[in-house]
Amino acid sequence: MSYTFLDLAVEVIKMQNKPMSVYEIWNKAVEHDLHKKLPKYGKTPEQTLGARIYVSIKQGGDDNPFIQFSKRPALFFLKELTVPSTPVPEPVTEEKPSYKERDLHKILSSYVFSDSHFKSYTKTIYHEVSNKKKKGKNEWLHPDIVGIRYPFDDFCEDTRHLMNAMAHSKCKIFSFELKRSIDFSTLREYFFQAVSNSSWANEGYLVALKYDQDPDFMDELRRLNSAFGIGFIKLNIEDYTQSEILLSAKENELDWNTIDRLCEENPDFKAFINTITSDLVVDKMRNSNDFDTVFSTDEEFQVYVKEKHIG
């Protein structure tokens, strides 16, 4: 019988002798090369690992070796081991990462620039440069990053001229709300923040480097996605090109009223819109310096991640 995700989880928890999250289990497995025993583990092994453990627990019976030690955060332990007497063996809050949320911007920008769905040039929107008005008026108004997909590489010049003559643009504008991590305690707040500041675009996304592996969390995220149309992207810190859309965004018509307000409130967004307009007039992208920079080599990406202590 081949080595399974459940075998891996049992081996790691025995080794550590403490309740663990699926992230902790997988990271320890990689640290000790146990993942290499698996026949395959795919692009999202933590998600697969979590699903396997939950199914085993729900099915129950003597064949299930696991118990769920806690729900917030989701920690797992083994029946055969002595459960610690304290409710939580260690402080359950994860160590606050040293990197800043904006350190992830270049990673997201590089992903959407290289990915075939987006093929987009992006611009960071700095909230702090917005007009200072009545407190709360501009809360959840600004997205973190906006992106534009031009038709220049998708259609030949003759086709673009016809499209312009028929007032039919194939540009697509994206909006992204970016977070370092999301769990049940922050899901609804972050999701509705994305609804508020990204629904005006053709496609709006909530993006995270880490997220809760609890299947109930994913069920709630799918429900919100279905109801409000905001997509979800998982960033990959090992290889940004392997980041992926876990839930697709609903495609919308642009909300011109919100675009107009954003132009009035934020000079970064106004510059982004003016750049798009100018490029479309001359039917080409004039200057890539109008947009955020992206990684040119894998080595540059790896150095950046190490220098920013992102992990």
Image (tube, rainbow, N blue to C red):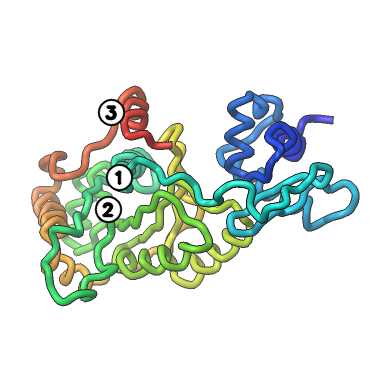
Which of the numbered marks, if any, corresponds to residue 296? 3
At a point 82% along the width and 45% down the height, the residue shown is: 65
At a point 26% along the width and 54% down the height, the residue shown is: 146
156 vs 274: above or below: above
Label 2: which secondary element: strand
**Residue pointed to by mark 1:** 105
Q: Estimate the spatial distance between the alpha carbons at disc 3 and disc 2, rounded to whole Å.
A: 20 Å
In this orientation, which residue lies closer to the viewer: 100 or 290?
100
At a point 64% along the width and 35% down the height, the residue shown is: 41
Residue 164 x/y as whole percent: 18, 58
Residue type at numbered disc 2: Ile
At a point 51% along the width and 51% down the height, the residue shown is: 93
Residue type at numbered disc 3: Ser
Query: Mark 1 touching mark 2, by CB under 8 A?
Result: yes
Label 1: which secondary element: helix
Query: Mark 3 touching mark 2, by CB under 8 A?
Result: no
**The N terminus is located in which quarter?**
top right
**The C terminus is located in which quarter?**
top left
Q: Quadrant of residue 310?
A: top left
Residue 194 x/y as whole percent: 36, 64
Left or right of residue 43: residue 192: left
Label 3: which secondary element: loop
**Can you tell which of label 1 and label 3 is closer to the viewer?**
1
Residue 266 x/y as whole percent: 14, 62
Query: Residue farthest to the front?
Result: 85
Residue 216 x/y as whole percent: 62, 62
Which of the numbered marks, if any, corresponds to residue 248? none
